Image: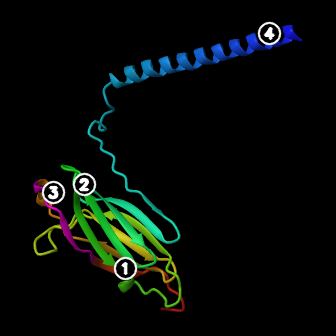
Amino acid sequence: MLRLRRTRTWGTLALGLLLGLTIGGATTVGVLIGRRSSEMPPLPGLADLQLRAASTHGGETFAVATGFIDDEVEGLYALDFLTGDLQCLVVNPRNGNLGGWFKTNVASYLSVEKGKKPSYLLVTGQINAAGGYGGQRPAHSLCYVADANSGEVAAFTFPWAKAATTAGVAQASEMKPIGKWKLRNIGGQ
């Protein structure tokens, strides 16, 4: 019995050593391949490729999404289903402080049915519009809010002064609706 236990111990040790060497060897090969591929020139046309991604997520009573406000700044949109409050918070990349706070209430634009719990969807898109707010250009992103119950969707944006970000001045204003559409046609409405 003692001899069997020693054999198992040595077998386990050998297996662990073999597994460790395999992982170490694979890591070394990965580092060497990565180093070699970083020395290779980029594929034609992809040298200046910059990826931009927006994300969104929601639950039963809250949704968040991100969208680019200008070339250097991203905003966080947040929609509270219980109150209908839509806000966009922007962090100033130069100092890390709050660079902007924009808000509206979507319930005043979307026909939320009385007594029915709103079921909102929230996504962002891009727009590149010149002017629109007394000569001040709007943010580069639109925030789309849809009510899944009524089938209505509204788009919102806000004025954005890039120079204020550079100067470290926080901005705040009401979000403005860009448009409203009905995506669901029930009963010929």
Is residue 65 magenta-colored? Answer: no
Q: Nearer the viewer, mark 4 or mark 1?
A: 4
N-terminal of the two: label 3 or label 1? 1
> Which residues, given as a range, are shown in magenta?
167-176
In the rendering, which numbered label is found on residue 165? Answer: 3
Q: Is residue 126 above or below residue 39?
A: below
Which quadrant would the N terminus be assigned to in this image?
top right
Q: Which amino acid, mark 4? A: Arg
- Residue on which the image places disc 2: 73
Name which quarter of the figure residue 69 lies in. Answer: bottom left
The x, y position of residue 20, in whole percent, is 60, 17
Q: Secondary structure at mark 2?
A: loop
Q: Secondary structure at mark 3?
A: helix
Query: How many marks do you count on the picture?
Result: 4
Q: Are marks 2 and 3 in contact (CB under 8 Å)?
A: yes
- Residue on which the image places disc 1: 106
* Picture residue at 82% right of the left edge, 13% below the top: 5
Q: CA distance from mark 4 to mark 1?
A: 72 Å
Q: Which amino acid, mark 2? A: Val
Name which quarter of the figure residue 163 lies in. Answer: bottom left
Q: Which amino acid, mark 3? A: Thr
Q: Which amino acid, mark 1? A: Val
